[in-house]
Amino acid sequence: MPFILLERVLHALALTSDSVPLDDPAPSSAAHVLVRVWLPDRPGALGLVASRIGAVRGDIVGVDVLERGTDVAVDEFAVDLPDVDLVPTLVREVEEVDGVSVEEVRVVSHFPDARLDALESAAALCAATTVEELHTVLVSQTRREFLADWAALVNGSRVMARAGDNAPSGEVLEALVTGTSASTLVSDGVTGPDDLAVASFAGHDVALLLGRAGHPLRRRERAQLLALVGIADRAWELLGDYNVPREHDRHASA
């Protein structure tokens, strides 16, 4: 079955990722810093920001384009600093570049990797053996992958699975799904509230929601959530077919 082959490939990739560090070990005094920046979408702007980061002895280990609009982009830089006390200086240096502003800065224990996180979530979904397990894995992986405060899978006001703390009630979640589905731009993952992302299943009357306060959700993350739900939707369909007894199975067990 093609789905089983996909599971094996994704599982192998996930196992490989465990043995290969994404970033080189840093000195104990170093700080892993995520710097989210608004910058003009013009040639040279990225290089100027990189130069400013280098001026405070920052080592750029990754750049993630979270969103691009008309003449502006939102990029997230993964930066190793020799000392956490340099963070305010880093912000001042970056904002010296014309047209650039720092949206947020976070000191993290390790740098996220959107592509690897997505593969690991897909592998976990493929490994589910029942629909109920799939639901539990989906909300758990969603919360981990997006560093969310909470994630919930809902059918109307019925919460089918949830992960994290302070998730809204079933009635509030239903209202959020209804409200966001009224806008094509929101339902297509183009835009949405800073602290909320919603993705609906094509094959089931169900929606996945995640909440994240303090760290605005951007277009690339919304597209990532839609792709994750697409995988979960197909896995759900295959699990449903797989777990229904075939006619010859019923005769064999009689």
Image: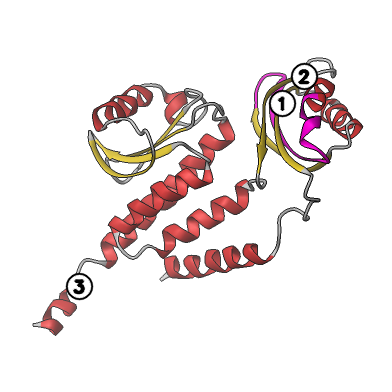
Q: Earlier in the sequence, mark 1 or mark 2?
A: 1
Q: Which residue is mark 2?
A: 100
Q: Quadrant of residue 169?
A: top left
Distance from disc 1 to disc 3, alpha carbons, whole Å, reads 55 Å
- Type of the residue with mark 2: Val
**SS of the residue at dot 2?**
loop
* Residue at 63 percent of width and 46 percent of height: 112
Residue 90, given in percent of the width and then of the height, sits at 81, 27
Q: Is residue 12 left or right of residue 135?
A: right
Do residues under tags 1 and 2 come within 8 Å of each other at their CB atoms? Answer: yes
Q: Which residue is mark 1?
A: 37
- Type of the residue with mark 3: Arg
Residue 89, given in percent of the width and then of the height, sits at 82, 25
Res. 246 mark = 3
Question: Can you say whether 54 is above or below 96 in the image?
Answer: below
Question: Can you say whether 251 is above or below 227 in the image?
Answer: below
Determine crowd level at label 2: few under 14, some 14-19, many 20+ residues with C-alpha closer than 10 A: many
Residue 86, given in percent of the width and then of the height, sits at 81, 31
Q: Earlier in the sequence, mark 1 or mark 3?
A: 1
Q: Name the residue nearer the viewer: 3 or 215.
A: 215
- Type of the residue with mark 1: Val
Residue 151, given in percent of the width and then of the height, sits at 40, 40
Span colored in magenta: 68-88
Do residues under tags 3 and 2 come within 8 Å of each other at their CB atoms? Answer: no
**SS of the residue at dot 1?**
strand
Q: Is residue 80 magenta?
A: yes
